Image: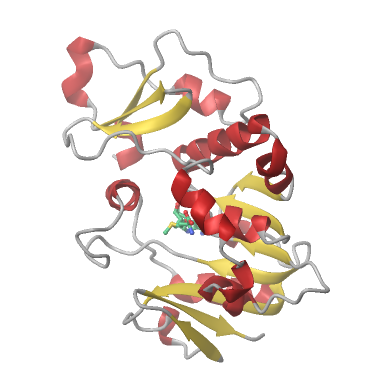
Amino acid sequence: MSAESLIARNFASAEIPQQLSSKPFLAALPELTAAAEESYDYCLSYTNGALSLDALKDEALTGVCSNFLTPAMQRRLRQPFKQQLLGKALGLKAQRMQRILDATAGLGTDAFLMAASGCEVTAIERSPLVFALLEDALLRAQLTGGSFAVIASRLTLQQDDFLSLDARQHQYDTVYLDPMFPAGRRKASAKKAMTLLQQILPAEDCPEQLLSHGLKCADKRVVVKRGRRSPPLAAREPSLQCKGSTNRFDVYLP
Ligand SMILES: C[S@@+](CC[C@H](N)C(=O)[O-])C[C@H]1O[C@@H](n2cnc3c(N)ncnc32)[C@H](O)[C@@H]1O
């Protein structure tokens, strides 16, 4: 049984927003009841208006959601993106807006930062559960209005497996990859969201395909996020690297 089949929902009186394409997925999850609570490992609920995920057997892992409206995100949005590591790796030029495919969207932090820098971003997420959290966050950003809605308008979400995209019909300036890694890659201080995702989602099992498909879909470059000391994806040496204190971005030129 996959981890995703051990997830229940507890929406109480909260309605699933009509705008969410994940509505059928959410509605089909089994309802959490006191009698069956032991049978589930995770539960989705609406907490403070946001779709969020709790680990039922680990009190430290509760309230995981995607959220573009946090003070931490606002601090990051205030820093000039082109001076940030990811901005440098993308090779952004002032005069031209890039079309970026974030092929491993996750909870969308990187996709939102790229969209905030003025790029048109399509973000693909394979897991229906993670996609639901991401889509809910984007809807909240749209409804907040102002600059959040402007950024959200540059971000298109798609629930799919990147490897199933037809490269002849999907060409982007840049393909961005941030694949899953087994638990233990990140430090104990790793964010609880990533810890929870590492429990639920499989570690990347086809890095070669991910990179070679990225190179087929990218006109200009593929950017891969890695831990600072991790080996390059699929043991393929990049054309250049942008190194930070904990992370590194490897750049491949097709
Ligand atoms: C480490 S997370 C990405 C985090 C993301 N960069 C962020 O800022 O939140 C990796 C995500 O990629 C997704 N993923 C892995 N392989 C995929 C594929 N072939 N197609 C689409 N999504 C994939 C996983 O389900 C997971 O949610």
Q: Nearer the viewer, residue 227 or 95?
A: 95
Tell me where residue 223 appears, x and y as whole percent: 56, 75
Where the C terminus falls, by quadrant? Answer: bottom right
Q: Nearer the viewer, residue 25 or 63?
A: 63
**Coloring basis for residues:** secondary structure
Q: Nearer the viewer, residue 223 or 24?
A: 223
Q: Is residue 173 above or below residue 55?
A: below
Q: Nearer the viewer, residue 150 or 169?
A: 150
For the view shown, which residue lies furthest in the right direction?
95
For the view shown, which residue lies furthest in the top direction?
13
Q: Residue at x 35, y 77 (%)?
A: 245
Q: Residue at x 75, y 77 (%)?
A: 93
Tell me where residue 179 appears, x and y as whole percent: 44, 64
Q: Is residue 64 above or below residue 86?
A: above
Q: Residue at x 63, y 73 (%)?
A: 82
- Whether residue 108 is visible here, answered yes or no, is no
Tell me where residue 133 appears, x and y as whole percent: 48, 37
Q: Is residue 120 above or below residue 199?
A: below
